[in-house]
Image (spheres, rainbow, N blue to C red):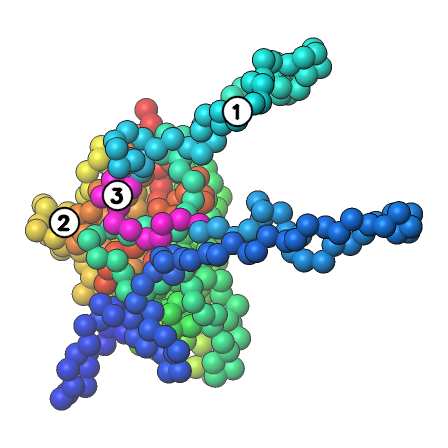
């Protein structure tokens, strides 16, 4: 949850949100453009010719030539065009005259100058072997990259307007009020693996507004094995509370602690489809985790409310013969399914597709742990099909996914086609949308195809 979203005091005109990035006190400049744009890299002057050593000096040792000796290949270069609208994000570059741009390495060799004999080929067998290059090893499989693989680059965005915040962190959080834990949280976490019939990818990323304000990440994500079950969870610390990052990271850890001893029982309930018993047991486990979370807050000298956080989790059996997936949630966030290129909202107030997307997201709930331990919502997802993708996320991703068709199209076109690698998934999960700058945590589960 974003603390910058609170209403303005009476008598003051509300700010337009992240249409313009907030100016920090003492900022020398206003950050209004991408940090990747308008780079003007001037090549350093070429070093002068090395002096010719005298005959006596040649015997004294090597001559050290003053000046720049960095090879030209190591000079800094722009790393990309910067965040730009991704109407066709992966289209090959087109030259002004039409047709794809040829890479620099494919340029034809320069014609020989006048008076110079054109090369006629290698003069000796050794020269021919050197010109041909090293021979490929026999029996080695060629390196085949997925069709969606692209070289990583600056973060893209969807929409006609670029986000107001820079695309990368601009500051590092400092210890505030003696809270060392906050500065030890990394900006980004990525995880994944395979478990039974599913492949997992998970990421938790600090939002643009928290990066700009030098605040720590308040979201958390978890991927853990509990016997024959896979437990994945995301949590969103309430931005208006000063220690909510303790709460989000604490609740996923404590939920795993209480689920582990009950893994076999939970697996049996999923196998038999006992929804009522599953709801009762998981509600007790969440309540136990919330009680322990409140006790930890008090030991730190904090009110339990200052650790307020949401929670949502999925329990997935390793047995491919058990198609049920158990869902547990307290507070806002999202649970969506990508099936055959279309998005379904599995945690919505209404059915059907509305003007804003696939159903109305439950985004107005303010239930938070550790206080709202009695307001646990559960469900069994029993209609799983091969090739489905379940997307469990905090509202930092759930809101733009439901409300922005371009983001659904962008992620659906990639996540619905193949399982990305960890680095590629992290890049995809960070694709930005203007006015959505909160922390973003997401866990995706790819069901094995038939």
**Mark 1 sits on what residue?**
114
Q: Residue furthest front?
A: 115
What is the magenta range?
Answer: 79-89
* Mark 2 neighbour class, 10 Å CA radius: few under 14, some 14 to 19, many 20 or more: many
| Residue at position x 38%, y 61% in the image | 35
* Disc 1 residue crowd, few under 14, some 14–19, many 20+, Cα 10 Å: few
- Residue 306 versus residue 444: which sits nearer the camera? 444
Does the magenta portion include 82? yes
- Which residue is tagged 2? 357
Q: Which residue is mark 3?
A: 410
**What's the CA distance linking mark 2 and mark 1?**
67 Å
Residue 417, percent across and down? 31, 33
- Mark 3 or 2, which is nearer the eye? 3
Nearest the eye: 252 or 414: 414
Q: Secondary structure at mark 1?
A: loop
Considering the whole magenta stretch, tell me its main secondary structure: loop
> Looking at the rendering, in which quadrant would you find the N terminus?
bottom left
Between discs 2 and 1, the one toward the N terminus? 1
């Amino acid at each position: 949850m974003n603390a910058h979203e609170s209403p303005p005091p009476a008598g003051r005109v509300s700010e337009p949100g992240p249409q313009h990035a907030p100016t920090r006190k003492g900022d020398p400049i206003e950050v209004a453009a991408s940090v990747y744009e308008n780079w003007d890299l001037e090549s350093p002057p070429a070093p002068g010719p090395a002096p010719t050593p005298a005959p006596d000096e040649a015997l004294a040792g090597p001559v050290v030539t003053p000046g720049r000796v960095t090879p030209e290949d190591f000079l800094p270069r722009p790393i990309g065009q910067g965040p730009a609208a991704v109407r066709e994000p992966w289209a090959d570059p087109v030259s002004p005259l039409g047709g794809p741009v040829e890479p620099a390495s494919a340029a034809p060799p320069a014609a020989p100058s006048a008076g110079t004999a054109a090369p006629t080929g290698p003069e000796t067998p050794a020269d021919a072997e050197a010109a041909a290059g090293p021979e490929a090893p026999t029996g080695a499989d060629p390196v085949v990259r997925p069709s969606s693989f692209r070289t990583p680059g600056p973060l893209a965005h969807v929409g006609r307007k670029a986000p107001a915040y820079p695309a990368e962190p601009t500051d590092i959080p400092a210890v505030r009020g003696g809270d060392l834990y906050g500065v030890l949280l990394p900006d980004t976490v990525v995880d994944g693996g395979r478990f039974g019939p599913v492949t997992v990818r998970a990421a938790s990323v600090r939002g643009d507004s928290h990066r700009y304000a030098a605040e720590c990440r308040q979201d958390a994500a978890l991927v853990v094995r509990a016997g024959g079950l896979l437990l994945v969870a995301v949590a969103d610390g309430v931005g208006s509370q000063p220690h909510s990052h303790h709460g989000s990271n604490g609740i996923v850890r404590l939920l795993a602690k209480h689920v582990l001893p009950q893994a076999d029982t939970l697996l049996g309930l999923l196998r038999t489809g006992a929804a009522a018993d599953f709801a009762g047991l998981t509600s007790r486990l969440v309540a136990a985790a919330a009680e322990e979370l409140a006790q930890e807050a008090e030991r730190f000298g904090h009110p339990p409310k200052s650790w307020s956080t949401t929670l949502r989790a999925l329990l997935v059996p390793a047995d491919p013969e058990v198609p049920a997936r158990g869902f547990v949630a307290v507070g806002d966030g999202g649970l969506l399914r990508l099936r055959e290129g279309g998005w379904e909202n599995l945690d919505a107030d209404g059915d059907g597709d509305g003007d804003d997307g696939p159903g109305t997201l439950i985004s107005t709930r303010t239930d938070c742990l550790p206080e709202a331990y009695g307001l646990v919502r559960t469900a069994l997802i029993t209609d799983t099909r091969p090739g489905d993708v379940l997307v469990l996320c905090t509202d930092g991703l759930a809101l733009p996914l439901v409300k922005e068709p371009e983001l659904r199209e962008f992620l659906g076109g990639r996540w619905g086609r193949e399982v990305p690698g960890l680095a590629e998934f992290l890049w995809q999960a960070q694709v930005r949308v203007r006015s959505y700058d909160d922390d973003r945590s997401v866990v995706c589960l790819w069901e094995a195809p038939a």
